[in-house]
Image (spheres, grey):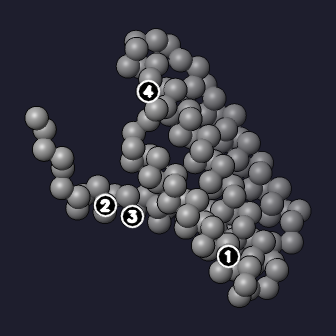
Amino acid sequence: MGNPSIHRIERMNYGIGAVLILLAVISQPKPIALGIATGTALTCLNFFILRKLIVKWTTAAQEKKHGYAPMLMLPKMTGLMVAVAAVVLFLPVDVVAFVIGYSIFVVSITIEAMYSALRTPEPSE
């Protein structure tokens, strides 16, 4: 299933991304809105795949099994690099807007880190 923290980060990616895209669509020119949308979509897809791989990896480790998830990290990263290059080279996007959209995961992780540090732990029985 995975750590609840990872799921919160992923949901925040979707939420922050949706708000950012909506604001860009209504207030920015097409290249900027497209850059933010594609950057956000790629980072959300990347985090989704990464979460799946990490959950498989850690579950296999807990069960003392040898999983194949670590071997999929290189193809995932290669695919991500190809996708980023394709967006930047072939789509009419603003590159700075693309980077802003892609960087929302940093905001999500920061918010989750602050939330985890500030919340009071549940009492153990």
Q: CA distance from mark 3 to mark 1?
A: 21 Å
- Front-most of residues 101 and 116: 116
Q: Amino acid at mark 1?
A: Leu
Q: Which mark identifies residue 22?
A: 1
Q: Secondary structure at mark 2?
A: helix
- Where is mark 3, residue-wise? 111
Q: Total marks drawn?
A: 4
- Where is mark 4, residue-wise? 58
The answer to whether one can see residue 50 in this image is yes
Q: Secondary structure at mark 4?
A: helix
**Mark 2 and mark 4 in contact (Cβ < 8 Å)?**
no
Q: Quadrant of the C terminus?
A: top left
Please determine whether, in this image, residue 24 is positioned above or below residue 92.
Answer: below
**Mark 3 and mark 2 in contact (Cβ < 8 Å)?**
yes
The answer to whether one can see residue 96 in this image is no
Left or right: 92 as drawn, with respect to 41: right
- Where is mark 2, residue-wise? 115
Please report whichever mark, 4 or 2, sits nearer to the chain's N-terminal start.
Answer: 4
Q: Secondary structure at mark 3?
A: helix
